[in-house]
Amino acid sequence: MSATRDTPSECLERGLTELGLHSTLEQRHYLIQFINLLVRWNQSYNLTAVRDPMEMVTRHLLDSLAVTPYLLSSPVLDLGTGPGLPGIPLAIIQPASRFVLLDSNGKKIRFVRQAAMELGLTARVEVIQARMESYRPREKFATIVSRAVAELEALWQASAPLLTTPGRLLIMKGRRPEAELTALSAPHPLCHRLTVPGLDADRHLIEIRRD
């Protein structure tokens, strides 16, 4: 008899435990609801190449949440959020923080707005359609996070005017980007290797501190 496959909820709960993240039953429910929304919208709008809900738990939820220990404080800007990653999962697991989710892609922003509304996040999650180079917010951000939407130097140039002091720019990458690190003008970048439960692939976080 073949082994029973885990459900997305079981995979999520185990992964959160491995990441050392405390979560409530309600938070886990909303994280799975986000995946369900993504699956449904993906059928028409092609928001992500990942189609399988189990794979989405690993590659989207747990991958996003792996950066949680590095968040400095609120407010947080998700620069180039795409379909709400990592911003929506982080907002669910960080209920005391405010988030701005920014992207220039109209169909992805429409999905993120709908997801924020259905997940009850609109009081502390603002969704904005704009290019990162032209974005001029009302206030600066303590933490800016971006999930490999551009090269390090381009992200640093776009982010530097938006950061508070102290502040943190967190850039999620796959393999360690040696050439990009060499070309980076930001002072003293830190490179952290991330371990994402269930994911057999390189993950790194580039941290740039403004103190």
Image (cartoon, rainbow, N blue to C red):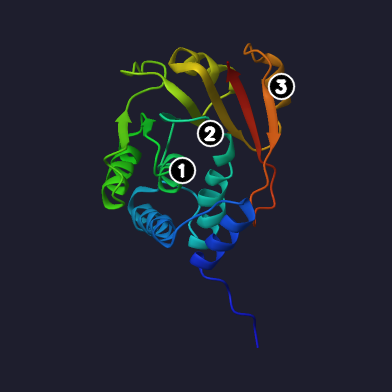
Left or right: 43 with respect to 166? left
Nearer the observer, 150 or 162: 162
Type of residue at label 3?
A: Ala
Residue at 58% x, 74% y is 5
Q: Which mark is residue 179?
A: 3
**Residue appearing at x 39%, y 40% in the figure:** 96
Would you identify the image quadrant in which residue 174 lies? top right
In-image side of 189 versus 16 (left or right): right
* Labels 1 & 3 near each other (Cβ < 8 A): no
Q: Which residue is mark 2?
A: 71
> Is 53 drawn above or below residue 191 in the view shown?
below
Q: In this image, 175 relative to 58: left or right?
A: right
Q: Are marks 2 and 1 in contact (CB under 8 Å)?
A: yes
* In this view, 42 is above or below 203: below
Residue projecting furthest to the bottom: 1
Q: SS of the residue at dot 3?
A: helix
Upstream in sequence: badge 2 or badge 1: 2
Separation of residues labelled 1 and 3 (CA atoms) = 29 Å
Task: Tell me the element at label 2.
Answer: loop
Amino acid type shown at disc 2: Leu
Mark 1 — residue?
Answer: 90
Q: Quadrant of the N terminus?
A: bottom right
Q: Quadrant of residue 130?
A: top left
Q: CA distance from mark 2 to mark 1?
A: 10 Å
Image coords of residue 61 (percent x, y) = 51, 51
Mark 1 or mark 3, earlier in chain: 1
Alpha-carbon neighbours of circle 2 within 10 Å: few (<14), some, or many (≥20)? some
